[in-house]
Image (cartoon, grey):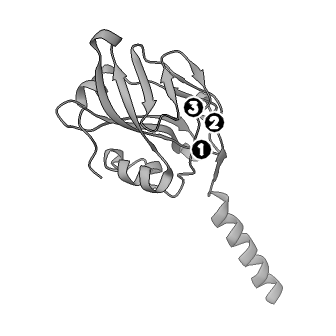
Amino acid sequence: MRSKLFLSAIILTSLLFAGCAVQNKVITKAQLATPKITITAVDGSFSIKNGEVFKPSFSSKTSDFSLQNKNENVIDLYDVAIEKYGAKKVKVLVGEEDSSSEFQGILLFSNVFDDGFGPGSRSYQIKVPDMYIEAARGGKVSVVYETYPRKAGKTGKGWVLWISDLPFEM
């Protein structure tokens, strides 16, 4: 009887944890793929220009962060991204050097879930469409991110960029 109970407990535990993927994959290659945009860390630790391939200088395990919940409103999570997950404050320069607009930003690079697959699980490709830049004007916050597929129909977010033309309230 005890052996059946013990075996049942092992099987139940295995089933419970079988669906729990962890974020162990660290992305080592990234590219900013939006013309006329430069992203620079406020602390001076990095600068990313369009077309350049770079190695992200930081990334975080965000699996316990509601950022990874597809139903969560990601736009409101920038303060937690900084305080708990090491996101960096950045300046986002949009346009040509002589006629550019500067935006405030917060950039988060996330480790990839072990069950992630596809291009977004192997490298980050940062794209910031014009509509997100326009949505960040007038003190509004805009958020753009890249997702990648995971097993069982799930998705993960590889990177997230919050932008605004005014400083973020913390």
Left or right, residue 153 beside residue 13: left
Count residues near mark 2 (Cα–Cα under 10 Å), then give few for <14, some for 14-19, many for 20+: many
Graded by Cα atoms within 10 Å as few (under 14), some (14 to 19) or many (20 or more), the crowding at tag 3 reads many
Point out which mark residue 120 bears.
3
Furthest residue to the right?
A: 3
Q: Nearer the viewer, residue 134 or 1?
A: 134
Q: Secondary structure at mark 2?
A: loop
Expressed as whole percent of the image width and height from the top left, the position of residue 14 reads 71, 66
The residue positioned 65% from the left and 41% from the top of the image is: 26
Above or below for 12 versus 61: below
- Label 2 to label 1: alpha-carbon separation: 7 Å
Question: Circles 2 and 3: CB distance less than 8 Å?
Answer: no
Q: From the image, tell me which residue sits under label 1.
A: 111
Please tell me whether mark 1 or mark 3 is closer to you in this view: 1
The residue nearer to you, when weighing 105 against 77, is 105
User: Quadrant of residue 29 in the image?
Assistant: top right
Numbered circle sitting on residue 153: none
Res 157 seen here: yes
Image quadrant assignment for residue 133: top left
Q: Earlier in the sequence, mark 2 or mark 1?
A: 2
Residue 17 horizontal/vertical position (percent): 66, 63
Q: Earlier in the sequence, mark 1 or mark 3?
A: 1
Amino acid type shown at disc 3: Gly
Question: For numbered disc 1, what is the local secondary structure?
Answer: loop
Q: Which residue is label 2 attached to?
A: 27
| SS for callout 3 | helix
Find residue 97 and report its image quarter: top left
